[in-house]
Image: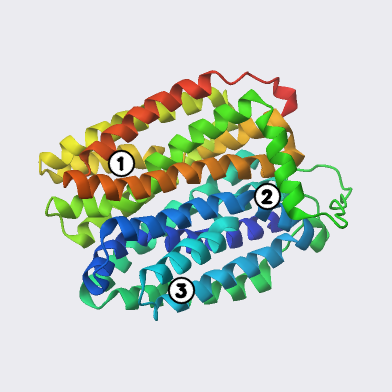
Amino acid sequence: MKKLHYSWVVLAVTFIAIIVAGIIRSSSGIFIDPFETEFGWDRPSISFAFAVGLVLYGFSGPFMAAFVDIFGLKKMMLYSMSILIVGLGLTFVMTSKWQLILIWGVMLGIGSGLFLTVLSTQVANRWFVKRRGLALGILTAATATGQLILLPVLASIVDNYSWRAAIGLIFVLAIAMIFLISIFMKSWPKDVGITPYGNESLIIEEPPIVVNRNPFKVAIASLLEGLRVKEFWLLAGSFFICGLSTSGLIGTHFISYCVSFGIPLVTAAAMLSFMGVFDLIGTTISGWLSDRFDNRWLLFWYYLLRGISLVFLPFALAQGSYTWLVIFSIFYGLDWIATVPPTVGLARQTFGIQKSAMMYGWITAAHQVGAGVAAFSGGVIYKVFGSYMWAFLLAGGFCLLGSLFVILIKKQPSASV
């Protein structure tokens, strides 16, 4: 029997780590109402804390990529997961809004930055030659898989016990993840004496040696390089819209939006989880497609269809029909993070494989600025209008604009991939 290539072991460990970090970030929507009830904080204040976390995890991405080059992939995964553990532990004793901002904004934002931005690209680039797009699609889908498995469970725990019990569950999972990373994770194929998956040569390439590099200078230098390239602006602009229309709006406010129409918390969380099922399918297929088709046209259709679905949601909820809500969850779920593999593919085509992780980190920073804008403005719109309807309609309109951005990207020769 053919021996399993260790690249797939690394993929599995990374997949689980992203699930844990992803559920920490995506669970924020479950805690809006409990935090309002227990602490008396208003929704814009809570939304602001979550928005800070979304923005910080995005902006930490390029620096995380530089730190990985200097300290190693495994060490940075351990450091980042430790920050998440400390932040979750401090959540049990917080009493003030500034503490919510510090913990869920700063600590959990920075702690999740590596896992939810550049980690997928780093692992796919280092460990795979063949099936690189598929590997990236699988890892990208891990965030949604966390929702699929745990959001309804966490919502049920909040409903039947308390929000602290729900935090306790993900706290234990994060601790378990430390042991998995310590035992099984490796930074390079060379560490286990092999070549990347699909590398037919038997020559084990030495990882690049990084000596006395300042990670902040490296990250800023890559940003300045990107700002001089039109494709960088178009990718960053479209990804800003991606973040605005996914983790910022749906991830933060979808559950509360459903609850405002009388849908039970657990049912709303189950719908978000249901999206995760189809996002896992859609993103994996998107990775496969990105290896075979023009990534620009993939993104065009992803943004166009997402915009249509977001405009449709307020009318689906107004009908009070679970059938329409399920249809939205399927349609939107297939498209949620499907944008990532072709976006990474275009970054790789434009900047080359060595620079693509860093450039994608900055593009992801734009994604998270969009997410932060939507997370905060969604709470403000709800307070002003007593409804999220305008937030979702505006997000749908932005997605239609994003579909035009990606078509303006110059097609690169296939040999440059």
Res. 122 mark = 2
**Residue beneath disc 1:** 330
Among numbered discs 2 and 1, the one appearing first in the sequence: 2
Among numbered discs 3 and 1, the one appearing first in the sequence: 3
Q: Circle 3 — which element? A: helix
Question: Quick check: 207 left or right of 329?
Answer: right
Colouring of the image: rainbow
Dot 3 alpha-carbon crowd within 10 angstroms: few under 14, some 14 to 19, many 20 or more: many
Dot 1 alpha-carbon crowd within 10 angstroms: few under 14, some 14 to 19, many 20 or more: many
In the rendered view, tell whether residue 37 sits above or below residue 293.
below
The amino acid sitting under disc 3 is Leu
**Residue beneath disc 3:** 88
Seen at 44% across and 27% down, the residue is: 402
The amino acid sitting under disc 2 is Gln
Question: Quick check: 21 left or right of 195?
Answer: left
The spot of residue 77 in percent (x, y) is 64, 64
Instruction: State the quadrant of the N terminus.
Output: bottom right
Seen at 68% across and 64% down, the residue is: 76
The amino acid sitting under disc 1 is Ile
Q: Circle 2 — which element? A: helix
